[in-house]
Amino acid sequence: MSSVLVVADHRRGDLRDISFELVTAGRQLANASGGDLHLAIVSGNTETFADELNREGVDTVHTIEYGEEFNHDVYVQATDALYQDLNPEFLILPNSVNGLDYAPAIAQGLDLPYVSDAIALEYEDDTLSTHREMYGSKVETTIEVTNGPFVITLRGGEWGAAEGTGDAAIEAFDFTPDEDAIRSTITGFEEVAGGDVDISEADFLISIGRGIEEEDNLPIIEALVEATGATLSSSRPIVDNGWLPKNRQVGQSGKQVAPKVYLAIGISGAVQHVAGMKNADTIIAINTDPNAPIFDIADYGIIGDLFDVVPALTEQFT
Amino acid sequence: MMKILVTVKEVAEVEDDFEISGTEISETYLEYDLNEWDDYAIEEAVQLQEEGVADEVVAVTIGPERSEETIRMALAKGADRAVRVWDDAFEDVDLLDVDAKAQLLGAVISDEDPDLVLTGVQANDDSFGATGVALAQHLGFEWAAVVNALDLDTERRVAHVRRELEGGVEELTDVEIPAVLTIQTGINDPRYASLRGIRQAQQKEIAPKTLGDLSLDPNVLDSDLALTEMYEPESESDAQFIEGDPAEQATQLADTLRELGVISE
């Protein structure tokens, strides 16, 4: 039996969306390989989480009581213990920030082949074909993996959330970690995206990316913001460079926004950025590169140089 | 005083227009540079040295001779010396997997015996985001991934770090040393190499290491992963493109914005 083991992702009392997507992908692999689908919930409100994740197609949910929050040393040990017990053919983990913090250690510790950030999977004849992106989002690749069991992390938003109500067996897994091997301690959490402006409240965001090139060019955008009454936001590199404060950052590690209009200027549309703004009602993009992924989700596009288009646009409102 | 080792990678960046042949992009369309995340890792190490917390910073890379130019950038920014792992056996490998990288870098780290290893969260090119944590597990070091603030307590041998989670939340974590920390962009403000730094870098050592030098068998390069296809993603764009010269584009876009009802004039 080549079963599938999925490990759920949660934080501060809530399951993260990716957990439900992992269930969908896990069911797909279980079907392809003729095995069972097992879920593991490590730490947190395991009972509540088990009920929430008991979706159609889940065979068994294993709960592990140990503390409230994610700790990679606990996750590595717990997943390892479950792996030894279940001998799954597939270990399916989230490519979240927490996934980045423990999935590679599990593959390394168990000496299993590892592929991260997969956006699609196929399984046939003992070979797992994983699809993933390379060079930003410029190309996609297929990596064929043999000699399973396999450890794979999945990108969020690529599989639909599992639905329906399942009739999974919910079982407490008997596990006590080796406390000496827990060599990191989480001491707290902090919200860092506060400040003077809440960009998630704005109706009209003008968002600026790498295309602005230099901090000295920011006034070109600020003039447009002023003339239109919009709110200024940005992609990650602008905040990394210290040109705008963290509370202006749209994306996975910044704010999720859903304004009426999102005008992306000089933003290529990396997946981490798109995750934060794809729910805008109308997306407009200005970019020099016709292949920029931002155009894949844009309603209106201008292929052009922001240094020509933006001043001309500002003039329209002054 | 601490010894810090920083893993760095030379990465290829692809021009806007490019062609794929087989499972690679031809050299014509590639430009090589220091991986963006590694630039922040180097800066963090050099700052620790300037603060008197560290007394040696060693940069380590896996790469062909061409990559020395990139490694010199790390030396010009303040790393003391570098180690470059390469072997003729690497020429035939089109995918160096995470386990191979962990073993290669692990062998260098076992020789160097640092207190702290800094890596980038991921590389610009293949974005596996796995080397640092796999390396820590391989070495038996503790670790933390996606670190955007670092404060070292050298007496208690604890790294107080912040991990950048999703949605503007940071996790505060204490990590025992020795440790591998994967460094996120934005943790500092990477310097440009000074002319003096660039001159000094010419005199600094880049020690080449082969598999034999590291007492590793060529089978560390064997992989269960095979890169079988590379293709351009199908464009899913159903955007309505606004044509014309910039003035015409601006006029049309202004009309659209007014129609969408978001302009307060």
Image (cartoon, coloured by chain):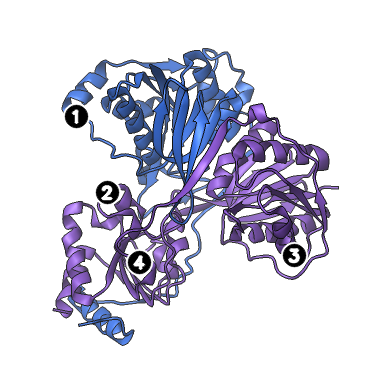
Residue at the image point whose x is 50% and y is 18% from the top: B108
Residue at the image point whose x is 42% and y is 33% from the top: B9
Question: Label 4's element?
Answer: helix
Q: Colour of chain A?
A: purple
In this figure, which residue is indicated by the disc labeled 3? A55
Q: Nearer the viewer, residue A236 or A73?
A: A73
Q: Position of residue A117 (x, y in %)?
A: 56, 49
In this figure, which residue is indicated by the disc labeled 1? B194
Residue at the image point whose x is 35% and y is 64% from the top: A290
Question: Label 3's element?
Answer: loop
Q: Residues within 10 Å of mark 3 (few under 14, many from 20)?
A: many
Q: Which mark is residue A242?
A: 2
Chain letter of disc 1 in the image: B
Q: Position of residue B101 (x, y in %)?
A: 54, 29
Point out the residue furthest to the right here.
A1
Q: CA distance from mark 2 to mark 3?
A: 44 Å
Tell me the quarter of the picture where residue B184 sits.
top left
Please, what is the three-letter code of the amino acid marked with disc 1?
Ser
In this figure, which residue is indicated by the disc labeled 4? A199
First in sequence: mark 2 vs mark 4: 4
